[in-house]
Amino acid sequence: MKTSALLFVLFHLLILTGCSNPNIQNHIVAQTTVKAVQDERQYTFYIVQTKGSSTRTDEKTSYAGTFDLLVRDHKGAVTSRKSLNQSFGSKPLLFDGPVNLIAKDYNNDNLFDIPIGFPSGDGSDEFKYVIFSVGKDGTIFSLPGKGYKKEGFVYTAAGSYSIEFTHTFGIGQGERPSILIGVKKDSGGFEPAKYVWNGEQFNFQKDSPYIISQAKLNAHDENYLLTIIQTEYKKPLTPDEPGFSIFESMHRGRFDLLIQNGRGEVTNQVVLNKYFGNDDLGFMEAFPLVFKDYNKDGNSDFAIGQPGKDSPEFQYVLLSVNPEGMVYNLPAFGYKEDGFIYSAETQAEFPLLDNGETGIEVTQNDFNGYAFAPGKYLWNGSKFVFSTTK
């Protein structure tokens, strides 16, 4: 079972102004309560202001001064307390606005982890985070990050004091838990990178290119390698943000499709975003490229999809590889006049039509009810045209 399934997080996310607790004797900036399903452990995390001031403007409270991270168990006893200022260079800190503490398990040790961070202050627009964890005895300790800028911190292109990192669980042979992040590019913007857990710390790793998916294609007496690479990083949306989709929750930004022949020569490289209105794209995970000849012209075709913005279906682009290793689009019309294949299926693979028809079978939403109806796209020699099935 994945570690995250063992942690049931009850988010209180109380952003309190001028509030104090008789057992804590400090102003509470933020708090959250978490409970482990596995062994019933329950802890409440607090950020408390021990010294300083607060101001309220535009319905937002800012806190400046010194702060502690504090943990209480289910009986209300304080089990551990740690100075945030000491963790960030023993200087005054500023929380400018709401702080939502989010607990996860980033290194698969069945313990709660909470990242807390501040702007890096080096002009990079990155935040630097300390990942605090609490042991089974309620003691706070940190998970160090190394290999990028100042040791001990995890850096990423983000904009909040506590963040829910995008992460992988490290399931599979040779895989390790990783935190997916973005770092500043010399040319502007951010590029993807990650911190990989080695059993003791998170080590920074930047792959070039940053590969999302790969597939081999044997066609036209050539062995092609197709690779989807991420060229620009955008922080994936979280469930509380507008536009969130679970199908775009792992990788977000700009992506290229790279095609190489059997000699390693690049035959084509295209920007995938251009097929989707040049918007940011998002993917939930690495995904297979499934090859079929959908229009029966002898070239191998494959689909790449995104959640539809104004319908429950996915919108898919059909791409094809010609004998020279160049990619081109197979357009589709008739259901919605925008060139996409629409289907309620979330897998980028379609059944081929039989009975002498050339085309693909899809499933559409039945807007007259709350069900789905079959449909098909027929190839007319230059494009796929939608048709209802009878």
Image (cartoon, helix red, strand yellow):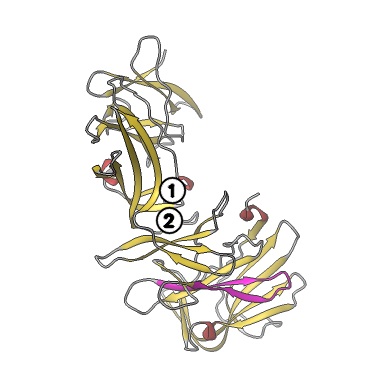
Residue sitting farthest toward the top: 355
Residue sitting farthest toward the front: 263
- x then y, percent, for residue 366: 45, 26
Q: Quarter of the image holding residue 111?
A: bottom right
Task: Report, in whole angstroms, how far the alpha carbon at label 1 lies from the one at label 2.
Answer: 7 Å
- Is residue 59 something one can see in this rendering? no
- Answer with left or right where residue 45 lies relative to residue 201: right
Q: Which residue is mark 1?
A: 248
Task: Please state the total of marks drawn on the protein image.
Answer: 2
Q: Amino acid under label 2?
A: Pro
Q: Main secondary structure of the magenta part?
A: strand
Circles 1 and 2: CB distance less than 8 Å? Answer: yes
Q: Toward the viewer: 189 or 324?
A: 324
Residue shown at 30% from the left, 44% from the top: 257
Q: Quadrant of the C terminus?
A: top left
* 96 falls in the magenta region: no
* 142 falls in the magenta region: yes
Q: Is residue 326 above or below residue 366?
A: below
Q: Is residue 267 above or below residue 250?
A: above
- x then y, percent, for residue 149: 40, 76
Q: Quarter of the image holding residue 261?
A: top left
Q: Which residue is mark 2?
A: 236
Residue shown at 35% from the left, 13% from the top: 357
Q: Which residues are magenta?
A: 127-145
- x then y, percent, for residue 331: 26, 30
Tag 1's secondary structure?
helix
Q: Amino acid under label 1?
A: Glu
